[in-house]
Structure formats: structure tokens, C-alpha cells
Image: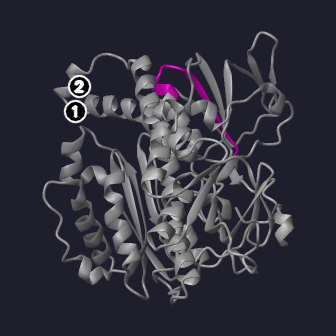
Amino acid sequence: MNAGGPAGDRPDYDLIVIGAGPVGENVADYATRRGLRAAIVEEELVGGECSYWACMPSKALLRSGSALRAARAVAGAREAASGELDVAAVLRRRDAFAANWHDDGQVSWLESAGIPLLRGRARLTGPGRIELDGVPYSARAVALATGSVPVLPDIPGLADAAPWGTREMTSVRQVPQSLAIIGGGVAAVEAATVFASFGTRVVVLARGGLLSREEPFAGELVASALRADGVDVRLGTTPHRVDRESGGTVRIALPDGELLEAQEVLAATGRRPATADLGLETVGLDPQERIEVDETMLVAGTDWLYAAGDVNGRALLTHQGKYQARVAGEAIAARLRGGPVRDEPWGRHAATADHAAVPQVVFTHPEVARVGLTEREAVRAGLRIRTVDQEIGAIAGASLHADGYTGRARVVVDEDRGILVGATFAGADVAELLHAATIAVVGEVPLTRLWHAVPAYPTMSELWLRLLEAYGSAD
């Protein structure tokens, strides 16, 4: 091993990636495909948060209740689906999707891809240098892919009450009889959906509305459905104090003096980039400040350090982080091999979609799927827009999909360019409508051309025709 820096003797690797979640794996993989010697560092499980404590286990927990609800929404199937969820079976299925919290399969994949795994805690010690549990390594480039960590709200007593975070929620072994959820974002409403399906008494305490970053109707539909499922949804409230009694009961004091009790409390109030103890100060960066990157994920003020995924704060979504990782891996290889870097908008080495074409799904009942800008965001961006709404239940395909289908769609049209800049869907299984919208937004497909994309009948995709008709009738 050679501990020399990039400008000295031959470094140990061309690229060292810190963090072996989906983002880090993709950075290393794409760089390796282009001929670089890339190694990856991980102090926990290879596969990261998404594989073991977030995306995969949470969606496995949600899916069983969703499937049962779908069956009960169709006459004939409804009569056959008269039982309740087998919670133990749901948890076993969750365990399988989390690989029982073993990373052997992910490690095997790294080996098959020719990417060495360095186990331990890494810190930057200077340009192109890291220290791994006291052992120095060097590389021509380093990529940070350390993800994000939960933010605990500043509520008196909460930290001492042993609150659940999202890890405890997704890896739960004993389902509580009652659960208080603090927060109104994606993690909060998905958790409420899961535990309501398990028969837990759930109360949601949201400082504002639910899913406040989405179109207003999305949060309203989710709140209505949660209440119909027996969840006590409290909007516009934040606990005054939280305490766990000696017997284990959690007591939550509200500002109006009301006292709530629950077996467990989940704090789901957001995440922040995981930059603590990375040694950023050794390379002139403030660990308390956001890591600024360009479109290739190169950290501002450096020519060797990259940051992809949640750690750069651009878009805290696994799929968007993997997109950034593909861009970064290719860009790193291009630079180190002396090739051209195509970082113009929508170029091979530019994560352009981060800015106004991010797709995301909230797997609640109903699902909420969105790409691009909301109406509020488009107005804030100074665009001259028109919004078009459509009740999804009026579509023949939706009425076949579920009896009494309820849902709503909105598209945001840039009037000056005649293209979609945003689309939001709220309803059962609308996630499957999202990629068509993503292609329209990313491709900047003119609405005049979308008229020629004929939806098959009778499918839910006929929604696109109805939206175009409504837009045309507004001329």
C-alpha cells in the first residue's frame, strides 16, 4: 500500500468511494466499467440504508396492506378477502427483502464487479487521502456517498424518551398496540399507513398539513384516507413535551394541555446529510455547511472530491442518488482518463434532472406520485403556467380498476413553451402512471405531440387524453 497523495507516488486507487449504499455502489461500478481502479468503504452493511432500513423493508411492509385493500375494492374479490393481515407473515416477508440484515449477497456483487471492499470508518485527511480506522489510503479521486441521517425535533424530553426513528420502524419485531407519529412528511404518512393496516392505534401529529411539499389535494386525500382507516390525524400541532414513564408508556403533552399516551413514539421529521466526522475540515470544507457540487457532482473548490446522493442535499431520494452516481462515475472516469466531460444540460456528465424533473412516489393509500414542479413551485420559478385537473375516477380504466375509485391528477403546463413542467397523481396504483409523465417532462415533449400518444382503452392511462382535452377546452 502506498499512502502517497495524488501528486506524489502512485496512489492506492484511482477512486475511493466512501459509503456502499446504492449510490456508492453505482459510483464505483460506473467508474470501474470505464477502467478505473475503484475501491469502496463501508462501516455498516453493504447496500446501505435503502436495502435494510428504508426503501425495501418499508415498501415490503406497505405492500401486503395495499394488496388486501385493492382486493376489497373490487366486488367478487372483496367477498374472498374477508380476513385480516397475517402480521407475522408480513414481517417475515419484510425480513426476506432486507436479506435478514446480512450483506453477503451485496458483498458478492462487489466481488463480481471487481470492486474491493474496505470495511471500517473512513475520514478525509487531506486532498486525495483518507484514513480507515487508522490506516492511510490515497486515491486520485474520492467520492462521498454517505447518505443522510434522521433529524430529531427539538421537543423537550423527546431525546430521553427513546423515540423510534425510521430504522426502528422498518425493523420492528413487536407491533405496538398504539403509536404516536411526530411529522407529516413521507416517512410519517407511510408509517401511519403500515401500522394502521396492522391494527395499531395510530395518532399523527403534524406541524402543518400532510405532505406539505406536494399539491394540496394530495395531502388532503391521504389525510382523509388515514382517518377512514382509524388514524387520529392532528394537523397544525407540535408536542409541547414527550416523556416515557418508568412502565414504558410514552406521554405526549400537546400545547392545549391535552395529554396523549402511546406504547411507542416515532419521530419522522426529516433527514440531513451525513457529514459528521468525515474530516471535511481537513480539506477546507465546513462540516456544518451544505456540500456544494456542480452538475458532475464535483465538490466546489476541488478537482478531486465528489459527493453524490443524500450527502449533497440536492434530492434525498434513492433513485435520484443513483442517477447522480451514474453521472459521477462516468465524469470521474472521463476526467481521470483525460477524455472530454460533457456537462452541458442533459449531457452525459450532468445531473440536470435534479432541478426540475425529479420523480417520487409516496406509497400511502392513496398513492401520491409526482414529477417536476408543483403549481406553487412553478409560480415561484416565474413561469407563465396553466394547471389542468382531472378526477381520475371518471376514467373508464379507473372505474374498472376499483369500485368507487377516488383520485385526482394535475398537470402544470409552461404556456410559453407548450410543454409539461410538472404532474401530480393521487389515487390507487398511480405510481404506474408516473414514468410516462417523467418522460414527457424530461423530454420536453410538446403538448401538440402528446395528442398523438394514444392511450390504450380501457386503461388508467386514458387519463392523459382527458387532461389534454381539458387543456384544449380552456383555449
Task: Write the residue at 75% across / 57% down.
Answer: 275
Residue 447 found in image quarter: bottom left
Q: Which residues are magenta?
A: 195-207
Q: Position of residue 56 (x, y in %)?
A: 46, 41
396 or 284, which is in the foreground? 284
Say whether residue 360 is left or right of residue 299. left
Q: Amino acid at mark 2?
A: Arg
Q: Are marks 1 and 2 in contact (CB under 8 Å)?
A: yes
Relative to residue 475, is residue 457 depicted above or below?
A: above
Residue with the mark numbered 1: 74
Q: Is residue 115 visible?
A: yes
Q: Residues within 10 Å of mark 1 (few under 14, many from 20)?
A: some
Indicate which disc residue 78 carries.
Answer: 2
376 or 92, which is in the foreground? 92
Give the Cα distance between marks 1 and 2: 6 Å
Q: Is residue 178 magenta?
A: no
Position of the N terminus by quadrant: bottom right
Q: Is residue 350 visible?
A: no
Q: Position of residue 299 (x, y in %)?
A: 70, 74
Q: Position of residue 102 (x, y in %)?
A: 52, 34
Say whether residue 101 is left or right of residue 426. right
